[in-house]
Image (tube, coloured by chain):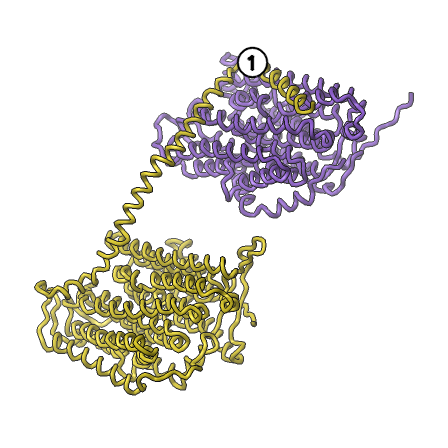
Chain colours: A yellow, B purple
Amino acid sequence: MSTSSSLVYLIALPLFGAAALLLGGRRTDKWGHFLATAMSASAFGVGLYQLSQMLARPTEERAVTQKLFSWIAVGNFNIDAALLLDQLSICFVLLITGVGTLIHIYSISYMAHDENRRRFFAYLNLFIAAMLLLVLGNSYLNLYVGWEGVGLASYLLIGFWNQKPAYATASKKAFVMNRVGDMGLSFAIMIAFATLGTTTFAGIADVAPRASEGALTAIGIMLVVAAAGKSAQFPLQAWLGDAMAGPTPVSALIHAATMVTAGVYLIVRSHFIFDLAPTAQLVVVIVGAITLIFGALIGTAKDDIKKALAASTMSQIGYMILAAGLGPVGYAFAIMHLLTHGFFKASMFLGAGSVMHGMNDEVNMRKFGNLRKFMPITFVTFGFGYLAIIGVPPFAGFYSKDAIIETAFNAGGLKGILLGGAALLGAAITAFYMSRVMILTFTSKARWDDEAHPHESPALMWVPIAILSFGSIASGFLFTRGHALVNWLEPIVGGHEGNHEEFLAPMVVSALALTAVAIGVAIALMKYQFADVAPVAPVDVSALTRLVRNDLGQDAFNEAVFMRPGIALTELAQKADESVVDGAVRGVGRLATGSGSVLRRSQTGFARSYAAFILIGAVILIAGIWVVTQ
Amino acid sequence: MTFTAPVLDYALLAPILIVLAGALVGVLIEAFVRSSVRATAQLFVAVATIVIAFAQLMRVRNQASTTAAMSSLTFDGAGVLFMASILVIALISIFLIADQDNFTAAAAAVPGSLEEREAHQARVRTTEVFPLTLFAVAGMLLFPLASDLITLFVALEMLSLPLYLMAGLSRYRRLASQEAALKYFLLGAFSSAFFLFGAAFLYGYSSSVTFAGIQAAVTGGSGNDVFLLLGIAFVSVGLLFKVGAFPFHAWSPDVYQGAPTPVTAFMAAATKVAAFGAILRIFYVAFANAEWEWRPAVILIAIATMLFGSLVAIAQKDVKRMLAYSSIAHAGFLLAGVIALSKSGLDASIFYLFAYGVATVGGFAIVTLVRDSAGEVTDLNRWSGLGKRSPLVAGTFAFFLLAFAGIPMTSGFIGKFSIFSAAYQSGSVATLIAGVLSSAIAAFFYIRVIVLMFFKDPVEDGTSVVIPSALTSTTIAISAVVTLVLGIFPAPLINFIASTAVFLR
């Protein structure tokens, strides 16, 4: 495999930005955000350069590596810190740096009045660097470093306004729940190393066919746990809604477009494991299917615009995970949906930010309405994102989501019907709750408080949104034209060689999906456009609504299953620590202190007794040697 | 009777001769230079002397010779490393010694007398300490090179006599300081007598005073074994006294506490390097083949020293006494390198000596900073909460304590790890177990001080941290950086030691 010496700049540039801003302190306040934006844009430039280089090479030589340094070298356990850029990671590199740069630009204006803007940009750059390391690492161990790095950046940014206790709690919640997933990843790495003897992707892909299926299944399931934690998938999904406490650009970049999709990357990257471990693959599709319905249901009950979008992110990632679990036929579609979702969800989040910007940081959609008159650009761009996510042709989401639904049906048998049905149901609910967001915010009657003065955001904010919404319009079409993305990724994840039985013809699937969407939109129109919306959420609602409003009991579930037993366990451990461990330590300490005090009395202060010591010591020494030698 | 003029290799002896010449220049400065500039001149001469000696040492470091001084000295790789360590430690100690506030103005005056007060008011300074230090350094440089018993004894006295004087120079608590000096002198003389007695037995055994001659006699096995036994035992007493090994340690807490802190630092660090250099040479060269005689006894002493030092340190309430007992414990750890009797044991010992010496100077340098109106505050209870008032000073001290305790990321960890693994490889599992056990005990009292500094409330009794002078800051900074760097990138020094350290036989 050929090497490239410029991969490191992808990571080094934003890392330098973060370091300069964090170490430079207040004196970088004036220009720090420009530096950070420039670093992110330069990384994007390096990414484009790498893409052009890659396109110039023949298909089988497109991947390049760069060894940075020998990281761990103990005996025959050698791990290099090395980077790998192939057709899969370049997609991510461009998404991360491209969307990242736009969001940097947006944030210059969005965070203009925040006195800690410099710190915000430092964290953003730190995130970009860590995320690039995640997708560029050539082994699970290198990936793990980036994985933890994005976790850190996410934690810092969710709690960016940590002066509000609720926000600080939200960041802690995200951090703790992510630890559960991280534990899964570390177990996966350990099992892989113990059974396969290596942690590099290439190495594992090499030896996996000769490994036992049990080991591969164990690794696979641990990887699913990791993916569930990072990508907010069932049962580790509860943190994502609270993560909306972070500034909106953060929600757009980290909690919609990039970091939360790391789980999808992990599964697609580990295709060599999942392809050989059907049980683990089954777990993947189940997790994906449950989450896509779960997220969509939560989305129907949210009045907070950002939380509604967060629920939809969860649900859309469920689609990606589902596709990734369907094997070689699904990987490319998972990545395609990931990329289109990156565009439309980022543009919608930024649009939500723009709405909040114009509405005194109000997030309750029941207090919005009729904003299309006052924010036409935001309305149009948000509208493109909306059409994309619900899957209206020819917007991006139509191509990617349709492909996933179709692949799910084609999985065959009862499994296919169940998965396809779930995906179809999800599409209907998505259409409903996204229409609800759209209607409540932009087209229904105005319900704002008197002091609200909605206005359009400055160009620095709407231009990035407009660029992103171009992606939500065109990317799906571009990716599917001549199977561009599928063919591009084929050398990495395997192709569509198998002649699968088509359960339903593509046209039928599209028709079904569009019908589902139409039903969802129609219900939303009836409920919200043509009926009055209460500015306060009604309380006399059905038990089901109440359940959905409570996030389907996810917090109660966590509390009952993880928190209370966990607290009981720590209390037990603490008691054991106090009585057994501390007791033993204190006992030893007392023994040592006691003997120390006794021995200390030998130090009388008299030179004569010291001399006597020496004499006695010498005599004992001679006696000792005598005894030994005789 | 014909007399043959001795043939000396002056280039190889130059490092020692330069230091002696510097000391003599210092004596002349005392006599002829005005008192107002005397201290500056002395400091300049002392620093220049050490730097030149070090440069000369580096110039000749690759030459090895047994006949540089008519086979009285052996100039070899290990010797070069010992000398280099001593010079580095001496240099950073000189900076501390230059902070004259620690020294009495009139050492010869009766404590509390009118004469003393007048001297203080006249701001007289004890600049004699510089030449004394250089004389001691010369003796220390000679000590680990000596390869016959007579030269070894001369070097022992040469390094000891100035130290006896220096221990009595403290400005505060002068009676304790003078008591310490006298005790040190009396017990030193006592142990020197043991040494000479042992030397006589060894001569009786081998009809030779050179290490090579003794080694030949041991290998030949023709001598009287009782003489060998008594000789080894008595010579060991003299040498183990210098490093403060149990049960020959009793002087060290009193002297460490009584002596002016910069002198304590110098004594604790440099004397240990020199004395362990001599011990390693005599045990590795002269007694190497009599291993079966001395090794069990030294193992016993090492274990007893480690445990005794660590246990008694727990009960200490004075920071200097605590460091004294900690230094006893470290003497025990270092004896593990003697027991190893292998190349890796030698390498590990040299690394340990250098790392420990540098950290010790740094640790004592910090002790000089914590004061009240009556001088240094060494009562540990009054150090509580220091971390809240002076986080940098307390943090640096905590760092040195962690190095003493052998926590990773410090040089102490690398030192302990390598010396214990060398001892283990040589088959002495008991030393390893005792070493790890006493390290754990030792960690207890080091960390107790850290807890005291950072997690207890400060006491309001006038204890304060003085702003260190530029010289003291330099010492602390160098020590801290060396301790940290050797903890993270020890490989260059370890490799250098491994490629250089050999005893020429």
Q: Residue at 49% of width from left, 32% of height from top?
A: B442
| Image vertical order of residue B299 relative to residue B108, above or below | below
- Given residues B157 and A262, the one toward you in this image is A262
Query: Under tag 1, what secondary structure?
Result: helix
Q: Residues within 10 Å of mark 1 (few under 14, many from 20)?
A: some
Q: Give residue A577's position: percent from left, percent from top.
A: 35, 38
Q: Residue at 12% of width from left, 72% of height from top?
A: A446
Q: Chain of mark 1?
A: A
From this viewpoint, is residue B467 visible? yes
Q: Quadrant of the N terminus of chain A?
A: bottom right
Is A217 displayed left or right of A79 in the figure? left
The residue singled out by tag 1 in the image is A609
Q: In which quadrant of the rendered view does residue A402 lie?
A: bottom left
View extreme (right): residue: B1
Q: Give residue A85's position: percent from left, percent from top.
A: 49, 70
Q: Give residue A229's position: percent from left, percent from top.
A: 34, 61
Q: Give residue A315's position: percent from left, percent from top.
A: 28, 69
Is A167 displayed left or right of B138 in the figure? left
From this viewpoint, is residue B18 visible? no
